[in-house]
Image (tube, grey):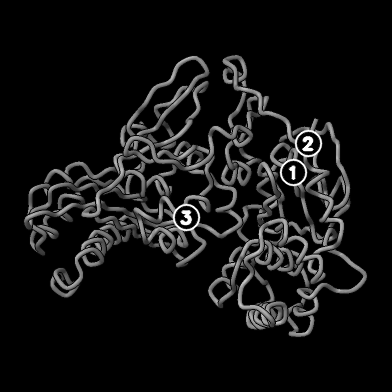
Amino acid sequence: MVNFILNDKEITTDLLEEMCLVDFLRHQQRLVGTKVGCQEGDCGACLILIGEWKGHLISYQTAMACLLSLGQVNGKHVITIEGLNQTDLTPIQQALLTEGATQCGYCTPGIVLAITGLFFNSSHFDPIQQLAAVDGNLCRCTGYQAIKRALIRVCQQLLSTTSSLNHSKIERITWLVEKRIIPPYFLQIPQRLQKYQLPAKPITTEMASVGTFIAGGTDLWSQRMDISFRLPLIYLSRDNSLKGIRIEKNRCYIGATTTVEEIKNSPIIQAFFPKMMPYFKLIAATPIRHQATVGGNIVHASPIGDLTIFFLVLETMLHLNNSQTRRTVALKDFFTGYRQVNKQPHEWVESLSFSLPSKHVLVNFEKVSKRTHLDVASVNSAMQIHVEKDLIQQLHLSAGGVAPIPLYLAQTVNYLSGQKVTTAAIRQAVTIAQTEITPISDVRGSAEYKRLLLRQLIYAHFIMLFPGQITLEALL
């Protein structure tokens, strides 16, 4: 049985938990403002807001209904465009109308909800934040300039008397109601939602042996017509012990169901990796990052998994559980073949951990895809390096899109260890790296192109980390 609040309505349904949420909204509830587009999370036509109880308040985030199942919204507040309707247009809707930012209107509901999500979560607004709010929304009529003008208009209008919003989450909802961005019924949602909050049941050996583990599900649901499930579904995100980021005994631990967006925004992560936010802006759209998890990204074993490639160079360890025993395996030893991993069907990843890097350690992440943003990689790569007394004391290098698995370039690492950072050494390292990879030609590029990309990305690591000392002109 699935229980949640849909707009202002309490829902109890015994439909299958694996039913796609967008189908439930449109066909069971006749809320057709949520559109069906790509069904892969790329277009934003089905974008909604999800409110989740966080112990003492509700946190609202954008999400793609085509990449959610009924089971994933159990105990939550789901908001569609119909749930924002009031007697008159909201300020966001009016701004879109005034600026002529609606043409066929197919994308408009998702855009309205995306901008509403901006006001739920941001404390101040600038052009970068404004555009990031709608980075998961496509307009098929190419009305982007009008949409941008509408964003600027509504932000200026609502913040005309203050430069920032430092409200708590509870005060923010009151402010949003006063500004008529959301209807008054939102004020009662926290109290109503609390009754749905039940303690998570521990995963048992029996459950693990017959069920299918679900983390964020962003890739799984996009392929739902091509896969078969082992029922019941086991929603790992319901277990709070699998979430969060913490420091313990000079190691950083990240729960397996911690989302990409939570990692990107984590003060702990940013303290050790200052460029984490720009790195992660290359990884999916904001609504996808709200849902995708680090454990899912790793276990999915995609050869181009962005998080996997990044964590490979941190000497990351995975901590697995089968409800009876726990074991630890190095991330670089976790991948045994294409989409195959060193994990039994009844095991799940609880967390990953890595040693905290010293201030002398440098880390860089690079990615090339057909589009700069919101696209899967053609080739991606990461490097960690520690140079002392002009010699490379420690080095780790990874590459994606050039082998059947996320690849740790062991031979290249062995060569560079103990070397000086020179153009000659880097060129030789690239030559060795070419012997370690086995790229194939596919829709993301030819094998020859991917070899060229990896060369350029290795060059980019050294150019970015040793500016002035290493230049592209010298390498070429």
Q: CA distance from mark 1 to mark 3?
A: 24 Å
Label 2: which residue? Answer: 196
Most foreground residue, 49 or 135: 49
> Is there a contact, CB below 8 Å, between mark 1 and mark 3?
no
> Is there a contact, CB below 8 Å, between mark 2 and mark 1?
yes
Residue 81 in the image: above or below residue 344: below
The residue at the point 79 percent across, 71 percent down is 179
Label 3: which residue? Answer: 264
Most foreground residue, 174 or 297: 174
Residue 453 in the image: above or below residue 67: below
- Report if residue 147 is visible in the image: no
Picture coordinates of residue 361, whole percent (x, y): 23, 53
Which of pointers 1 and 3 lies earlier in the amino acid sequence?
1
Query: Which quadrant is the C terminus positioned in?
Result: bottom left
Picture coordinates of residue 279, whole percent (x, y): 41, 60
Label 1: how many residues lie within 10 Å, few (<14), some (14-19) or many (20+)? many
Q: CA distance from mark 2 to mark 3?
A: 29 Å
Task: Give the amino acid at mark 1.
Answer: Lys
Disc assigned to residue 389: none
Instruction: Give the SS element for disc 2.
Output: loop
The residue at the point 45 percent across, 16 percent down is 325
Task: Give the amino acid at mark 2.
Answer: Tyr
Label 1: which residue? Answer: 76
Residue 101 in the image: above or below residue 343: below
Residue 136, picture quadrant: bottom right
Task: Give the amino acid at mark 3.
Answer: Lys
> Is there a contact, CB below 8 Å, between mark 2 and mark 3?
no
Which of pointers 2 and 1 lies earlier in the amino acid sequence?
1
Picture coordinates of residue 53, whole percent (x, y): 70, 44
Most foreground residue, 41 or 194: 194
Instruction: Give the SS element for disc 3.
Output: helix
Q: Nearer the viewer, mark 2 or mark 3?
A: 2
